[in-house]
């Protein structure tokens, strides 16, 4: 942790917190005035006066083009020269970017392009996937991953990332959980804001910084049944309380862009949703940046059933406030005829064009179109050169992303001696260790889990390997997962043959490390699952390995919570590794051998089975809550499964133990507007140094609308030497007690509040205090 802080301080010195694009004509943008010297709005006004309608519409097109030889590049270059393209994504090397920017500079008005890419958890150096980053509960680690992503992406000539992805999700069936930061509003908001600062720095135009476009606005993580692209239907209270705050936090942190989600919200697709894109985003939140439709989303409004044809869809999108059309010909084809027919106004187009040009101005591109991409003479001779990677930082962050789920009889840490059997197809996979959306990462540069273990033991121990099982072997599923990108490479042997080999291997070893879970493609866009158990005979493999009597360590690689009931009951130890990135194998080895003590905590509840979904810790109590001490029939429960999760939100073990004292409050009663300090003493009661995350939860037990049983409102990661203790305090402010009432007003209601502090969301110490009405105001609620 200390190293992360130091590495982070170095990189963060470039990144203070500007309110980019929110304050017209103020701030860093003024330092990047174009040669005319005009300020932003004046420059844009003058430029727009010179633009033809076609050139204006051209600015609203965001075109995807892959690097390397491309059949359509000539057409694209001609379009750019004609001023018909505003921005490009998926082009990621300096020569490719320069080629296209050259074309823009040849256009009549020389309006530069901007270049975007999906840099989600690293660019060339890959960090753990979103769920892994969130499992660190360490904002310095998150910031470090964001700074390095920005430095590497800007070093390749890029100007913008489609990140952070802050969709709250309570449904493990959804494949895109892997990209986000889990189920909790507070944690996701903090991480989102941290990443925006880290990407954008104090000046988005400066080398080493890129713009952030937060996504997917809005509520994409709440799609019904966890089935990708499906519908969202949600109460306004839940939206404003739980699902919208992370987007707002990113915007408050200065995010320059907002990507609009593909889903409909209460019947209206987000891309056509005036209420969302204007009333909430612009009027309530004051967003002044650019909005970007998701891939093909404008056209999809026909299938959503709200537009009759492409023209109708374009009209809906532009009037709702979707500025840029991503990978979609709709604006290019339809805006001009729509205007000529009087179906849209010039002002609709102009407003969107101004948003796009503002971004370019703030990027300093009117001053220098080649600002990030530089000159050819400075291009790296090898884009993928090892020297361009930040391995040490990747390893530090990955170590903190690992969550120890179980450790009976001190099975872990392992000793670097004897014989260790490593089993599982994922153990040797470099591609899967990177996870999905791995930007410009190169699988060959990734340390697989097996390689990490091999590097750690050197010649001190013998490693044996057996594949044991395929990750999936149903031919239909394999075909699906391999449709666009090869994800699964199955071993043709039968399940039994592979298991037999693994059992023989295990018998020769002192301990078995079984690496099971999902491929990266199984936890991706368009990768929803109705079954969240292990597939491909992996569970049978674990059963057979268990039967050998050897200690069984299960290491999980996966991008969503999985239902692992048998594993929890039978494995001797379990480590959640997610997809840990370029240095994943080394980081896992560091933890398995005890060179690093694990400190990650789950950012998402693990259910026992798919039938419990949605499952989240901050649920309402209901009128008939289930009480495990006094189980009763007519209470809110399943009769065929326990109520609780397999592993709760915030959970994660260590090789040492920590004790948490009772909660001390600075006051038993406080007037409205005052603060209360809640403290505990945390003691490392074990034999090893270690780190843990102290979590503060609050509950308003009697309010005008039913409030959750608890909600996260603060956390601190603390490092304690064996035997050391530390006081950890949180200041509870009025805002922490507030919620949206039935009239959608943010209120704080006087009365008693419960304070819970612990090391996960279930095992907490409790206290309570009274919030009194301000002088002269009404009585406290709840008697
Ligand atoms: C995804 C976005 C992504 C975009 C561009 C879409 O399919 O939903 O998250 O940013 O593609 O790659």
Image (cartoon, rainbow, N blue to C red):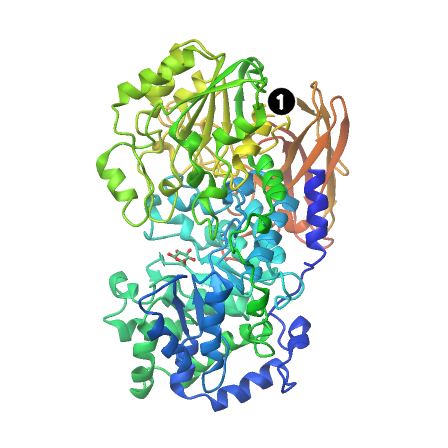
Q: Quadrant of the C terminus?
A: top right
Q: Position of residue 780 (x, y in %)?
A: 65, 45
Residue 265: in sight, yes or no?
no
Above or below 581: residue 609? above
Q: Toward the viewer: 90 or 389? A: 389
Q: Is mark 1 within 8 Å of ligand 1?
A: no
Q: Residue furthest bottom?
A: 50
Q: Toward the viewer: 83 or 416? A: 416
Q: Which residue is mark 1?
A: 655
Q: Position of residue 559 (x, y in %)?
A: 43, 39
Q: Position of residue 455 (x, y in %)?
A: 56, 29
Above or below 701: residue 236? below
CA neighbours of label 1 inside 10 A, class few (<14), some (14 to 19), many (20+): many
Callout 1: SS = loop
Q: Toward the viewer: 486 or 185? A: 486
Ligand 1's quadrant is bottom left
Above or below 247: residue 29? below
Q: Residue at x 71, y 44 (%)?
A: 5
Q: Quadrant of the N terminus?
A: top right
Q: Position of residue 546 (x, y in %)?
A: 40, 13
Residue 75: in sight, yes or no?
yes
């Amino acid at each position: 942790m200390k190293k992360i802080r130091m590495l982070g301080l170095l990189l963060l010195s470039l990144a203070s917190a500007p309110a980019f694009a929110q304050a017209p004509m103020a701030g860093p943008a003024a330092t990047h005035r174009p040669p005319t010297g005009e300020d932003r709005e004046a420059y844009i006004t003058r430029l727009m006066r010179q633009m033809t309608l076609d050139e204006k519409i051209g600015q609203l097109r965001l075109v995807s083009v892959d690097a390397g030889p491309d059949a359509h590049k000539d057409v694209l270059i001609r379009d750019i020269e004609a001023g018909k393209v505003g921005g490009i994504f998926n082009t990621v090397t300096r020569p490719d970017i320069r080629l296209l920017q050259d074309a823009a500079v040849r256009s009549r008005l020389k309006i530069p392009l901007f270049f975007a890419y999906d840099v989600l958890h690293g660019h060339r150096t890959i960090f753990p996937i979103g769920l892994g980053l969130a499992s660190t509960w360490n904002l310095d680690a998150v910031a470090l991953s964001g700074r390095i992503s920005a430095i590497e992406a800007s070093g390749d000539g890029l100007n913008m990332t489609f990140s952070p992805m802050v969709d709250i999700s309570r449904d493990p069936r959804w494949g895109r959980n892997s990209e986000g930061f889990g189920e909790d509003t507070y944690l996701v908001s903090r991480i989102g804001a941290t990443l925006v600062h880290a990407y954008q720095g104090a000046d988005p135009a400066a080398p080493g910084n890129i713009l952030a476009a937060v996504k997917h606005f809005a509520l994409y993580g709440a799609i019904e049944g966890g089935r990708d692209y499906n519908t969202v239907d949600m109460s306004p209270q839940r939206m404003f309380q739980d699902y919208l705050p992370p987007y707002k936090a990113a915007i408050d942190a200065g995010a320059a862009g907002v990507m609009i989600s593909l889903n409909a919200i209460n019947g209206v697709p987000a891309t056509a949703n005036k209420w969302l894109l204007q009333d909430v985003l612009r009027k309530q939140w004051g967003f002044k940046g650019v909005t970007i439709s998701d891939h093909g989303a404008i056209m999809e409004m026909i299938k959503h059933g709200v537009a009759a044809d492409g023209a109708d869809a374009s009209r809906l999108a532009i009037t709702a406030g979707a500025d840029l059309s991503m990978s979609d010909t709709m604006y290019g084809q339809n805006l001009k005829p729509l205007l000529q027919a009087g179906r849209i106004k010039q002002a609709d187009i102009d407003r969107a064009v101004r948003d796009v040009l503002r971004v370019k101005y703030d990027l300093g591109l009117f001053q220098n179109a080649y600002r990030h991409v530089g000159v050819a003479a400075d291009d790296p001779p090898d884009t993928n050169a090892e020297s361009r990677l930040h391995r040490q930082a990747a390893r530090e962050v990955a170590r903190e992303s690992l969550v120890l789920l179980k450790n009976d009889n001190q099975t872990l840490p392992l000793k670097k001696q004897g014989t260790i059997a490593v089993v599982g197809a994922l153990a040797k996979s470099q591609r899967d260790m990177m996870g999905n959306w791995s930007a410009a990462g190169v699988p060959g540069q990734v340390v697989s889990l097996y390689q990490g273990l091999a590097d750690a033991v050197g010649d001190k121990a013998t490693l044996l390997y057996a594949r044991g099982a395929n990750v999936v072997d149903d031919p239909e599923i394999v075909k699906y997962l391999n449709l666009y990108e090869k994800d699964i490479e199955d071993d043709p042997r039968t399940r039994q043959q592979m298991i037999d080999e693994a059992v023989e291997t295990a018998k020769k070893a002192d301990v078995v490390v079984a690496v099971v879970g999902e491929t990266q493609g199984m936890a991706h866009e368009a990768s929803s699952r109705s079954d969240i158990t292990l597939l491909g005979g992996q569970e049978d493999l674990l059963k057979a390995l268990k039967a050998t009597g050897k200690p069984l360590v299960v290491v999980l690689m996966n991008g969503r919570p999985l239902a692992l009931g048998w594993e929890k009951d039978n494995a001797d130890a379990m480590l959640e590794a997610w997809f840990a990135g370029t240095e994943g194998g080394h980081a896992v080895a560091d933890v398995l051998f005890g060179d690093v003590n694990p400190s990650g905590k789950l950012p998402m509840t693990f259910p026992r089975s798919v039938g419990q979904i949605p499952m989240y810790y901050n649920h309402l109590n209901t009128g008939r809550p289930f009480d495990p001490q006094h189980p009763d029939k007519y209470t809110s429960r399943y009769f065929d499964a326990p109520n609780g999760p397999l592993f709760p939100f915030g959970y994660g073990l260590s090789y040492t133990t920590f004790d948490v004292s009772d909660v001390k409050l600075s006051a038993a009663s406080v007037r409205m507007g005052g603060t209360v300090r809640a403290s505990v003493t945390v003691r490392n009661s074990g034999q090893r140094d270690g780190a843990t995350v102290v979590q503060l939860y609050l509950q308003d037990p009697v309010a005008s609308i039913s409030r959750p049983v608890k909600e996260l409102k603060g956390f601190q990661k603390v490092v304690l030497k064996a035997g050391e203790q530390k006081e950890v305090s949180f200041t509870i402010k009025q805002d922490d007690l507030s919620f949206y009432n039935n009239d959608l007003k943010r209120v704080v209601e006087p009365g008693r509040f419960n304070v819970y502090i612990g090391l996960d969301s279930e095992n907490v110490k409790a206290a309570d205090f009274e919030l009194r009405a301000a002088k002269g105001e009404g009585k406290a609620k709840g008697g």
